[in-house]
Amino acid sequence: MINLTHNTQRTIFVIAITFFMVACGKSQESQQPVMPAMPVSVLEMQPTTVPIQTEAVAQTEGAKEVEVRPRVGGILLKKLFAEGEEIKEGQPMFSIDPVPYQTQVSQANAQLAQQKARLVQTQREEVRLKQLLETKSISQREYDNAFSDQAIANASLQQYKALLNEAQLNLSYAKVKAPASGIAGRFLYSEGALVSANTSLLTTIVQTSPIWVRFSLSDSELAQLGGMLTEETVQGIALILPDGTQYAESGKLNFSASSIDPTLGTQQLRAEFKNADKKLIPGQFVRIRVTTGNNDGVFLVPQAAVLTGDQGKFVFVAEQDKEGKTIAAVRPVQAGGWSGQDWVILDGLKQGDKVIVDNLIKVRPGAPVTPNQPAGKAAEVKAETVSNEIN
């Protein structure tokens, strides 16, 4: 029988435990399952052409906003229109008490008649004295005075005619007429009020056809469009209504500021749209879509598939590694603006790349994946195949 020291026994025990743990570890490693490839949906990239455009919040305003003020003062007798209705240029809108102005017309007529009679008298006197002058019955001075009296009387006649015209004009102003066509605003006085000439604001008229839409674009938005906008650089302007539909008429740029507003950092712009059906209302908030050209050879990627990291935006693509396995790889991209629900990718992708569009929370760089076509795309392909077979 072999006698072992205490140290020898402890050494043998440690070695045995070590072998046991190694054996257990190998057993567990052999039993650990291999993670299967994650199924993902991919979109195969194909270059396309998208418009260079951007959208901005805008507000409509009347092309003309005219203030209606009386040209003569007096008691406002009656309002002759309905607030909010369409008004035609020249249409009577208010009636001011005409009696004082009718009296002025009568007085001017009387003064004019009196002056006409005086002119006839001076003319007759001038003719009579001229005959006496020819017979040397009077002096030249007496005739000259008569001739001057006739000239003064004629000048006074012209003055009284002007006074009559003024009185008649003031009488016509007692009917306050619309200076422009448009939509009438709220009546700011009441019937029976005393109004002053050229100062009392009675109401306003807003021209709604055409209608203007005011908006602005920031430095970054202008950079996406190729620089500051002018009538020559803008190829199209569309208007998006509050319900999301596009307005039927296309617009044109009728004002663009020549510099950037230093306070807001934006370029102030204004577009003009036809509005014959009065669908657009002044003061309405809408969206403006400005197009300046086209981007060729770009790729459209769903918004959810474009991720943001420390180095900027990137996507996951399904590609083969050195062993021929399909894995998820990170691909940095340069994104432009949006086109509908997709990002416009300007750089970083090439034709045929398969961009992963779902399970992005679980996808890791280098992890094996099983690419599948998205359900919507697969249905489209199946329907197209069935249609081709029927035809």
Image (cartoon, grey):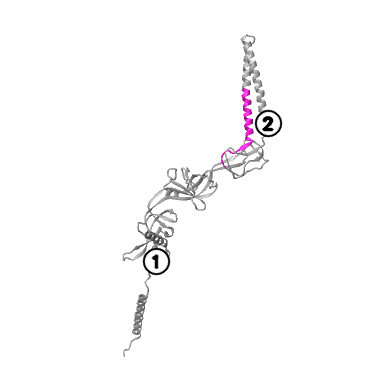
Residue under label 2: 103
Q: Nearer the viewer, residue 312 or 104?
A: 104
Measured along the vertical axis of the image, is residue 339 above or below residue 201?
below
Residue 372 percent across, percent down from the top left: 38, 64
Residue under label 1: 39
Q: Residue at x 63, y 31 (%)?
A: 168
Main SS, magenta residues:
helix
Q: Nearer the viewer, residue 155 or 365?
A: 155
- Helix, strand or loop status at disc 2: helix
What segment carries the magenta color?
155-182
Q: Which mark is residue 179?
A: none
Could you tell whether 269 is left or right of 323 in the image? right
Whether the magenta-drawn stretch holds residue 50 is answered as: no
Q: Quadrant of residue 102?
A: top right
Residue 309 shows in this picture: no
Quarter of the figure that contains the C terminus: bottom left
Between marks 2 and 1, how big is the CA–CA gap? 96 Å
Measured along the vertical axis of the image, is residue 270 above or below residue 102?
below
Label 2 close to label 1 by CB (< 8 Å): no
**Disc 2 packing (10 Å; few <14; some 14–19; many ≥20):** few
Could you tell whether 144 is left or right of 210 in the image? right
- Helix, strand or loop status at disc 1: strand
Whether the magenta-drawn stretch holds residue 168 is answered as: yes
